Amino acid sequence: MPQRSSKARNGRPAAGPVTLLIGTRKGGFLLKSDRARRRWTPAGPHFLGQIVNHVVLDPRDGKTLLCAARAGHLGPTVFRSTDRGRTWKEAQRPPAFPKAVEGEKGLAVEHVFWLSPGHASEPGVWYAGVSPPGLFRSEDGGVTWEGVAGFNANPLRKTWLLGEQEQTTPDGAILHSINVDPRDSRHLYIATSPGGTFESLDRGVGWRPLNRGVAADFLPEKNPEYGQDVHCLRLPPLAPDRLYQQNHCGIYRLDRPGETWERIGKAMPKKIGDIGFPMVLHPRDPDTVWVFPMDGGTVWPRVSPGGKPAAYVSRDAGRSWKRQDRGLPRSQGWFTVKRQAMCADARDPASVYFGTTGGEVWMGAREGAQWSCIARHLPEIYSVEAVTA
Amino acid sequence: MNVAIPSQLRDYTGGSAQVEARGATLAEILADLDRRYPGIRFRMIDEQDAIRRHIRIFVNGEQARGIGAALAAADEVIIVGALSGG
């Protein structure tokens, strides 16, 4: 492991209104709260009709937004705003794989799926995860993008990903969950679906799989070195030796320098199971996480189990879980929450948010204790990010 | 020559449905379009120089299969967003 300072940055609660950055199948939207988080005002759409996978604010300057978009007919791109969404410009060189040499088949970016700001010490650095799985880096605030050859051209990439697959939006094979160690800009974790979790200690030059203990029930070998299907991987900034993941095959925690993931989803109620897409961190407490279970049985309906949606929260790093469904539909609630569509804000107490495939946004006040619907009638929601003024 | 631009790409052309471009091949026309309207090429042609799945380009009424075709000054180029169902 690289040398690092032992302390991460301190997390202080935010105090101002919250803005939710919402990516949908038909454009991007903003949802702005008052200070009390009682009234919410929608704004947008931005890029109406375009598939917006992710809208992310740069926490280093508090005003730059990046938006990953593509239209049904058109190729993928990244839009940038340096005034919190009042005006937008397209990237001059969006993520694109290198042109293949004559006679060989090259990769083409189908969609830009995930955006992550780089390390606090590297203003202007961003990472993007794309489909087919590839990692890109920008050093100029998202104006131009270069492939991270250590992953994209890695001789083992295709092996790790179980081969190249046909792509569909947004459900094809993707690279997502780009996490930068807050103590060390060189130390990166990424995830691919399928493929698993991968770690780099040198800013993306070298990579190795980090999947020991993670099940892959869909493969002949149930605990392979790679090939797992990570749905969402999160690194708590205040405890950066810890990782949580919601996987296709369960919920897991890894405490570094350990190498073996623990299936913390085993503590979930058996009738609910531990399948889902999002994994949400508490803004300050590394032991508190939320998940949103879905039905992963039989043909994988990918809806709330039994039509009774609920979040589950753990306040002891996954040793136990508590159901949070107050205010949510008691029955006949069949929505799905995608991997980028659930988050928490940085207030105290934090509110938790999720967007549904049916175009609703829900807020869980007091850390998920009481849910209320704060927006409806939006297009299918792909991502929700909370930022505070 | 005149190039017909589909509605999906008119954000790039300031709303114009017909624009001018110069070149002796379709590839050169597309490169010239990108000089005049930065970003427009990548949204219809991928990084392997393939015409994207839901874009069609017609030269004098014939569908182009690639971007290598030679063009004459009087040729007509029409770019369309393909009907893709729904």
Image (tube, grey):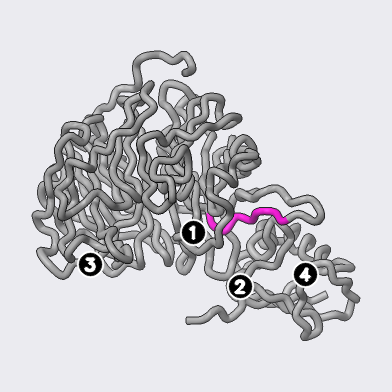
Under mark 3, the amino acid is Trp
Q: CA distance from mark 3 to mark 1?
A: 22 Å
Disc number lying in front (2 or 1): 1
- Asked which quadrant contains residue A337, the reply is bottom left
Q: Which residue is mark 4?
A: B66
Other-residue count near label 4 (Cα within 10 Å), few / some / many at <14 / 14–19 / ≥20: few
- Which residue corresponds to the image point at 39% horizontal and 27% vertical from the top-left? A259
Q: Earlier in the sequence, mark 2 or mark 4?
A: 2
* Residue A279 left/right relative to B58: left
Q: Which residue is mark 1?
A: A172
The label on residue B54 is: 2
**Mark 3 residue element:** loop
* Disc 4 chain ID: B
What is the x, y in percent for residue A67?
A: 48, 52
Same chain for mark 1 and mark 4? The answer is no
Q: Which residues are magenta?
A: A105-111
Q: Is residue B57 magenta?
A: no
- Which residue corresponds to the image point at 21% horizontal and 51% vertical from the top-left? A273
